[in-house]
Image (cartoon, rainbow, N blue to C red):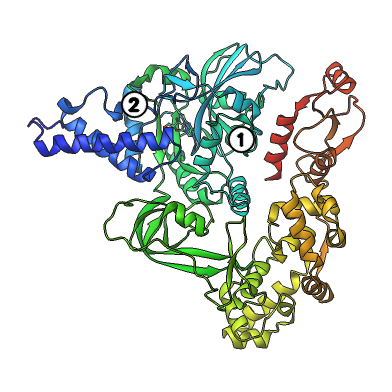
């Protein structure tokens, strides 16, 4: 009910304050790709403003940020009008609000009966419009202010993992014009890997995958975009000539048939109750997914009904974003402590006043290294924005009150290791400070924790606490000692029951059968994460070959640079490390080449022909990756070939493929296919 009594002075100034805060947040988010407040806080500000405007219509001016979408395009880019505006979405935050949405929809359609909905993850990335003419990507625009977007075509053409050509599965021509809307994002795994590499190179890390993706797209130098691992998820249609649809889920299927990725977690043509369960399922699943999502978008499925419902100002009446509880929150830094990791790296960690972030209480957040603390200038007593992304350790995004009076002096890294007291040195050219003591107990302990962990040797039940106790008691001083643990010893140390002790012993013994890549990763060689370990094992096949490989051979592997190659060589040249590995082999650890999922792989039964020059991977790597997914490669094109991958300067094989109507994949399409299946 609108309040008929006019707004008082306090309300008027609150409106001005809210608008200023929102505008400022908008600029930071859209123009600088560097948010200053959490999404949750932003939503709260907007909601408060919208509520006041609804109560006091005289305060609701057309230039209010509640009526705007995004931000005006930045001057550094050319602009182009969207032929149909790119709208924004209204938000819902509870089941009641979703039911209210459903009631509004049914009222609007004047149907008493149920409405079918399609629901998709609300991807947290950057909204884009890709315009395909006769199947070719011609323009790529950011959303901009919804009316006019920034032209980022060159960057998108340079980016990996984004289709540049529509494929037509049944051989029919793609539509003459197709304007696709979707979200450009960065997979979490790719983001983590990229940040690890940046840390190793002493570059600043990105705060989250969204900023990293948005920053990559809005570059003036498309070579930078090309170097960043981007991905696309399509969810909407602008104009389209040459195809028509009666439901939203048909549109999504058509996208897929043209080779445009859509979200596999989509609920198509469902009832409201099904939408509610879908939301709950996704809320639970969200941290296991390889992309960030901040809610579920619920859309009326019928296109006719969508048209009948139309839009209010900036958002459609037929769709709504049902947001998840925030994955970012603000809290206070109570202390900054320094931990010693398995490579001896000193990591500053903020001890926080406990705060609930998306269902989990967060008490610590990583500050990465000295440079990051300095860049963010985090000090004890500061109010900070913290975020949780998947299983990644929570991190401090930024200080909310840098102007606060009476802040203590800036944090500085200790000159000695907080565990063993040895000198802590910063290697020139690197961001990390390390404990110089090779035998630092913290290093050993952390190395063993990593060794036993999931993804490494995967010793179920051998967690951090148990290892701390075993290390304190002197029972485990190196990797090999783990394999000597017996039930009575465990039962004594942990005061655990016989059954649990037996389970742990059998988990440890069972871990002896391991793949080369997991074993390599478990060793904790600097710069050898899961990805690099896989690249090495795929290329070399056996542990022995990797142990003896020279830097030059290691460097030849696509995706492995000089620093990584030197680190691997350096590890196996170190006699102590080598002995430790040999001791493990003596205990019966037998790293075996990864089994190829021959019959069950996504490519099983499929034959690929590679032709022309591939620019981002070598032929051997491409072959290895196809085989790893159960596929085969062949030198010649025949009717039996399933795909021809055509690189630069592809010649007669390409012509033959076209004549035989064998599907031809561009390098980007091929990579997208690999990435999708390798997940
Ligand atoms: S539909 C008219 N679907 O959310 C419908 N949007 O607040 C407009 N987004 O700009 C968008 N995932 O960046 C839609 N599955 C999804 C989405 C999605 C993410 C973003 C998109 C849009 C914003 C709207």
Report the Cα–Cα distance between label 1 and label 2. Answer: 30 Å
Q: Which residue is mark 2?
A: 68
394 and 212: which one is in front? 212
Q: Is residue 557 left or right of residue 204?
A: right
Question: Could one spot residue 459 in this view of the protein?
Answer: no
256 and 63: which one is in front? 63
Front of the two marks 1 and 2:
1
Question: In the picture shown, does residue 617 fall above or below 314?
Answer: below
Q: Quadrant of residue 476?
A: bottom right
Crowd rating for badge 1 (residues with CA inside 10 Å; few <14, some 14–19, many 20+): some
Answer yes or no: do the residues labelled 1 and 2 have beta carbons within 8 Å? no
Question: Could one spot residue 645 in this view of the protein?
Answer: yes
* Quadrant location of the N terminus in the rendered image: top left
Horizontal and vertical percent for residue 368? 52, 58
Question: In the picture shown, does residue 513 fall above or below 163?
Answer: below
Q: Quadrant of residue 361?
A: bottom left
Residue ID at (75%, 36%):
616
664 and 76: which one is in front? 76
Residue most toward the right? Answer: 636
Q: Is residue 433 left or right of residue 83?
A: right
Q: Mark 1 CB in 8 Å range of ligand 1?
A: no
Q: Which residue is mark 1?
A: 224
Residue ID at (9%, 36%):
9
Horizontal and vertical percent for residue 544? 87, 62
Which comes before the other along the chain, label 1 or label 2? 2
């Amino acid at each position: 009910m609108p309040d008929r009594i006019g707004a008082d002075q306090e309300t008027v100034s609150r409106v001005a304050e809210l608008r200023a805060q929102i505008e400022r947040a908008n600029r930071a988010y859209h123009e600088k790709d560097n948010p200053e407040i959490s999404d949750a806080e932003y939503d709260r500000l907007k909601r408060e403003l919208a509520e006041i405007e609804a109560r006091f219509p005289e305060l609701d001016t057309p230039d209010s940020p509640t009526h705007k979408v995004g931000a005006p395009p930045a001057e550094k880019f050319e602009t182009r009008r969207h032929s149909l505006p790119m709208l924004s979405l209204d938000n819902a935050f509870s089941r009641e609000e979703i039911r209210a949405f459903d009631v509004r929809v049914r009222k609007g359609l004047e149907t008493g009966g149920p409405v079918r909905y399609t629901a998709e993850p609300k991807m947290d990335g950057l909204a884009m419009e890709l315009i395909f003419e006769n199947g070719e990507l011609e323009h790529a625009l950011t959303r901009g202010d919804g009316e006019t977007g920034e032209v980022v075509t060159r960057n998108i053409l340079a980016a990996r993992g984004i289709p540049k050509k529509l494929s037509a599965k049944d051989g029919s021509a793609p539509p003459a014009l197709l304007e696709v809307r979707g979200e450009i994002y960065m997979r979490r795994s790719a983001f983590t890997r990229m940040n690890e590499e940046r840390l190793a190179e002493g570059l600043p890390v990105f705060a989250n995958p969204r900023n990293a993706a948005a920053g990559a797209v809005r570059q003036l130098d498309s070579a930078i975009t090309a170097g960043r691992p981007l991905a696309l998820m399509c969810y909407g249609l602008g104009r389209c000539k040459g195809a028509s649809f009666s439901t939203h889920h048909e549109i999504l299927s058509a996208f897929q048939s043209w080779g445009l990725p859509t979200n596999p977690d989509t609920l198509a043509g469902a009832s409201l109750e099904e939408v509610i369960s879908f939301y709950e399922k996704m809320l639970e699943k969200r941290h296991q997914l390889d992309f960030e999502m901040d809610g579920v978008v619920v859309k009326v499925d019928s296109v006719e009904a969508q048209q009948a419902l139309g839009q209010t100002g900036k958002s459609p009446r037929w769709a709504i974003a049902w947001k998840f509880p925030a994955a970012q929150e603000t809290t206070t830094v109570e202390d900054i402590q320094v931990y010693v990791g398995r490579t001896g790296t000193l990591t500053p960690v903020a001890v926080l006043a406990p705060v609930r972030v998306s269902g989990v209480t967060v008490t610590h957040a990583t500050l990465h290294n000295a440079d990051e603390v300095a860049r963010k200038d985090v000090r004890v007593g500061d109010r900070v924005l913290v975020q949780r992304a998947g299983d990644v350790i929570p991190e401090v995004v930024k200080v909310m009150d840098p102007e606060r009076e009476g802040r203590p002096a800036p944090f500085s890294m200790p000159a000695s290791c907080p565990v063993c007291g040895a000198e802590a040195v910063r290697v020139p050219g690197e961001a990390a400070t390390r404990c110089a003591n090779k035998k630092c107990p913290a290093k050993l302990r952390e190395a063993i924790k990593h060794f036993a962990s999931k993804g490494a040797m995967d010793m179920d039940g051998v967690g951090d606490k148990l290892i701390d106790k075993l290390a304190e008691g002197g029972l485990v001083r190196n990797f090999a000692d783990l394999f000597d643990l017996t039930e009575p010893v465990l039962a004594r140390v942990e005061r655990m029951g016989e059954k649990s002790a037996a389970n742990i012993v059998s988990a440890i013994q069972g871990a002896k059968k391991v793949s080369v890549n997991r074993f390599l990763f478990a060793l904790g060689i600097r710069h050898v994460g899961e990805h690099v370990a896989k690249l090495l094992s795929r290329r070399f096949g056996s542990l022995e070959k990797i142990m003896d490989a020279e830097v030059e051979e290691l460097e030849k592997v696509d995706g492995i640079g000089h620093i990584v190659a030197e680190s691997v060589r350096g590890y196996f040249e170190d006699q102590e490390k080598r002995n430790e590995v040999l001791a493990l082999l003596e205990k019966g650890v037998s790293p075996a080449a990864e089994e190829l999922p021959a019959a069950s792989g996504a490519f099983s039964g499929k034959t690929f022909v590679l032709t022309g020059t591939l620019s981002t991977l070598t032929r051997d790597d491409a072959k290895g990756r196809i085989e790893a997914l159960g596929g085969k490669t062949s030198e010649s094109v025949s009717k039996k070939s399933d795909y021809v991958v055509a690189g630069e300067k592809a010649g007669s094989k390409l012509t033959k493929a076209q004549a035989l109507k064998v599907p031809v994949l561009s390098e980007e399409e091929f990579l997208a296919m690999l990435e999708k299946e390798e997940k």
